[in-house]
Amino acid sequence: MTASGTMDALTVIPPGRALTGRVSPPGSKSITNRALLLAALARGTSRLTGALKSDDTRYMAEALRQMGVTVEEPDATSFTVTGDGTLKAPAAPLFLGNAGTATRFLTAAAALANGPVVVTGDEHMQKRPIAPLVTALRTLGVAVEAPSGCPPVTVQGRGGFKGDAVTIDAGLSSQYVSALLMLAAGGGKPVRVSLAGDAIGARGYIDLTVAAMRAFGAKVEQEGPGAWLVHPTGYRAADFHIEPDASAATYLWAAEVLTGGRIDIGTQAEAFTQPDAKAWALIRAFPHLPAEIDGSQMQDAVPTLAALAAFNATPVRFTGIANLRVKECDRVAAMATELSRLAPGLAVEEGNDLIVTPVAKERMQPARITTYADHRIAMSMALVGLMVPGVTILDPGCVAKTYPNYWRDLAALGVSLEEPAAA
């Protein structure tokens, strides 16, 4: 079962039993979009397998096609990418929806194009900050403008850049660092990428970037906890397999422990290289989650954990999550608001922290859940519907951003989903 863009709402019916079965989560969005860009910058043909086909990755693939790269899709989980090592200036702006990875990565890569490139997105993307990356690109000699500090961004591509050192404030997003690292290998001399200060959102995603770069022939040296030296190797075509999406896996892990079931996702938690897989150690402790959870290094798993915390034995405070305020929506406020529809005060904001104080599920009430066009709010709040009758997810089709088959997979596990009657 899939939720189409025309479906207004979906009510989750509590199964009242343990969920068991096998479900294969989609490929990693984070790794797919890195691999697509690196393959596009390489000379030759690369074959990407295990890839995610979703809104975010389709935006990336289409943007690369606009820039002269051949991107074919031989099957539901593969891309074949052929390029000559260069990017052409597109005839029209690159529209990237609300895909943060595609927007940040292509803003930097546009410096390698041979003309002007406009990178833009939907109304949500046009509120997401990109100024730190713009400032960093300017220090490399890239001509780039973003008047609002958010997309749209205009880059005057010159087929390269002249700088050899850049410092980036990564407090808002590790994607800025990844964007610069991937650009750096296309320079004419070694480039040192350094962090300004110690703050960085989800450092593990930088490790994903470096690993992918190396798979496509780049030479990257770690010079310390906050500095990397990238050599001017460019990229070479490669065959590259993409692991399943760890963020998607968190919903299935949570469904398993909430219902006392057993769900085989085909990959052991320990086998994931993505940061969100660290959430498994917490999820398996349910209903005894720790009193405080630092979400800074597994940010996309925080909504999942917050939904789980609503049924924990004791209250949970989520810290280190300020960056969640500049995701697809303000996820701190969204989770506080939507959880509290089930029981007033179930979740509250305190500064940038989120505090979830569980109540007996019998005291929770039916609720229509606003999703803010955010796939993670929809998927995490659906978990609450496994336990509480009458939880209706509005705009369920927003899950297409990263997990198009989410509703179908829940149904395959035995969860009944109903479209409520029109009012």
Image (spheres, grey):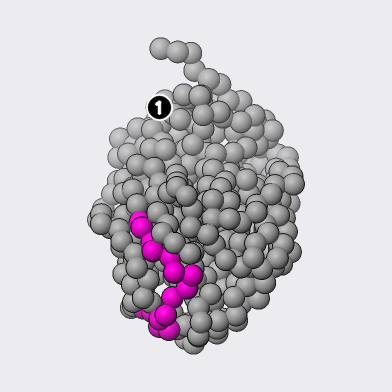
**Residue type at numbered disc 1:** Arg
**Residue 83 image position (x, y, % from top left):** 65, 62
Query: In the rendered view, does 353 fall on the left or right side of 271?
Result: left
- 414 vs 103: above or below: above
- 416 vs 113: above or below: above
Q: Quarter-wise, where is residue 344 in the image?
A: top left
Asked if residue 226 lies in the magenta stretch, the reply is no
Q: Residue at x 49, y 53 (%)?
A: 90
**Residue 351 image position (x, y, % from top left):** 25, 56
**Mark 1 highlights which residue?**
368
Say what secondary structure mark 1 lies in: strand
Q: What segment carries the magenta color?
A: 153-169
Q: Residues within 10 Å of mark 1 (few under 14, many from 20)?
A: some
Q: Residue at x 45, y 47 (%)?
A: 92
Asked if residue 156 lies in the magenta stretch, the reply is yes
* Of 171 and 363, the residue lying toward us: 171
- 91 vs 337: above or below: below
Looking at the figure, which quarter contains the C terminus? top left
**Residue 349 image position (x, y, % from top left):** 28, 49
**Residue 422 image position (x, y, % from top left):** 45, 13
* Of 141 and 224, the residue lying toward us: 141
